[in-house]
Each structure stands twice: as structure tokens, then as C-alpha cells.
Amino acid sequence: MKKIFASLIILIAISTNAQQFINSGMIEFEVRVNNHRMFGDGFFGEMFKDKMPNFSTTYYHLTFSDNKTIYKYDRLNEKDKLPWGTNNAEDNVWYNDFNSNTRVNQKFVFDQTYILADSLMKLDWKLMPNETREIAGFICRKAQAVIFDSVYVFAFYTDEITVSGGPMGIHGLPGMIMGITIPRMFTSWIATKLQITGVNTNIIAAPTKGKKKPAEELKQAVQKVSKDWGTWGQQSIWNIFI
């Protein structure tokens, strides 16, 4: 009888401490931007600095299921007043399919909405398992990668969420990315909460609103137009094609 009782205690302990893996749900991300640093000291910086808050915060939702994700704008912090409003942020959508290694982005660029279909961004991650941070209730491990040849990305991920995704096109870690900092973009993305019940996963589908255009062709056009914009021009390219 004592052996049976001891076995029951062990089974209960194992069940209680077993890691719970999540493969479907919705994560809210708080996106915080240092506007004054982002615009720099050029023409655009001087024109807008006295018209905008130093920092602004927006919220995005990342819905995930079946090894696919969709990342969309939700709202602007009510306290933040930007001179250009949301700048059509609601028209920007990131859809990633990790089963087929493809992505379809809907982007608003120069008063036109485009559909950009391509393979997933390739990132060569360096894991830093000894560095951890708690985000939205998850103990997350650190990793770093480089995008656009020279832009460092610092990320924190959890393997308790099995989808290898994250905000925008950032992906490729052994679990869900819950936090990102990109110093040269003066922006951070931090998960604030996870919802796993009552989530409408039917919205996880490739966007269709807009004119289809090769991503590289649009990138060359944007680079040509923004070549004299200084810091803000480079920021624009990174924000569009990340």
C-alpha cells in the first residue's frame, strides 16, 4: 500500500511539473519606438521632432496555429498623438507559412498597397542559452542575428510555444519569439499577453488586398526615391522589408 501511495505522489509531481507546449493562440506585442532617434538629424528629423512625442507605443497581434502566423496592427496607445496618425499601419500584414517556407506581406508604400510574396527571411541565429528573461510569464532564452547585412537583432524566445515564429518576418528559433530589440531601428517588440482560448485562427491566411509586386523590385524603387532622406530613408527600407 505504501508503494502504491508513493507511486501516486510521484505521478502527480511529474504531471504538475511537466512542461506545457502550446501550438495555437494569439500574442499581443507592445511595439515601442524612439521617434526622435529614428528620424535622426536630417531634414525629416528637424521637420517632425517638435510635432511628435519622443516615444510612441503601438500594439500588434500575432495569431498562430498549424505552424503558420499572421501579424497585424491592433491599436495605437491613446496617449500618443502622431502628426501622421497611424500612417496606414492597419494595411500592413505579415503572413508566414513555416511548413512551406513562404511568406506573403501586405505593405502600404507611397500611397499604394502591395502584395509581396517570397520565401521566408533567412536568419543565422547565435544562441545564448545562459541569458534569460521573463516575458509574459515565460522564461525566454536570448539569441542574436544580423539582417540587412549589418543590422543586429536581439531576441528572446520560449520553446513552450512550439511555432518557430515572431513579430513581422523574424523567425527561425527553437520556439516563439516573445521579445525583440533592434538598436539601429530604435525599436523594441515585447509580448504582453498570450491568449489560447477563444482565438479566431481562421484569420491566418495570406493577405490579398493590393497590387502584386516582386519584393526586390519594390525595394529598388524605394531605395531610389529615399536615397537623399538620410537616416529616415534607411529606416523606411528596414521597416518595409523586415
Image: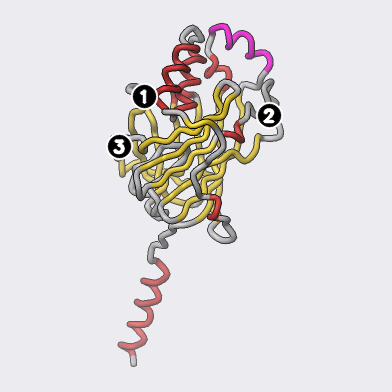
> What amino acid is labelled 3 in the image?
Trp
- Residue 80's label in the rendered image is 2
Local SS, label 1:
loop
In terms of secondary structure, what is the magenta stretch mainly?
A: helix
Q: In the image, what residue occupies the spot 28% across and 36% down?
A: 126
> What amino acid is labelled 2 in the image?
Asp
Tell me if residue 204 comes above or below residue 41 in the rendering.
below
Q: Position of residue 242 (x, y in %)?
A: 44, 30
Tell me if residue 85 comes above or below residue 1 in the rendering.
above
Tell me if residue 40 comes above or below residue 117 in the rendering.
above
Residue bounds of the magenta highlight: 42-51
Q: Which residue is mark 1?
A: 148
Q: Position of residue 113 (x, y in %)?
A: 56, 29
Front residue of this view, candidates 224 and 149? 224
Local SS, label 3:
loop
Colour scheme of the picture: secondary structure
Separation of residues labelled 1 and 3 (CA atoms): 14 Å
Q: In the image, what residue occupies the spot 33% across and 48% down?
A: 174
- Residue 231's label in the rendered image is none
Whether pointer 1 and pointer 3 mark residues with C-beta atoms closer than 8 Å, the reply is no
- Residue 125's label in the rendered image is 3
- Determine crowd level at label 1: few under 14, some 14-19, many 20+ residues with C-alpha closer than 10 A: few
- Determine crowd level at label 2: few under 14, some 14-19, many 20+ residues with C-alpha closer than 10 A: some
Q: Earlier in the sequence, mark 2 or mark 1?
A: 2
Q: Position of residue 123 (x, y in %)?
A: 32, 35
Local SS, label 2:
loop
Q: Position of residue 4 (x, y in %)?
A: 33, 88
Front residue of this view, candidates 111 and 43? 111
Separation of residues labelled 2 and 3 (CA atoms): 34 Å
Q: Earlier in the sequence, mark 2 or mark 3?
A: 2
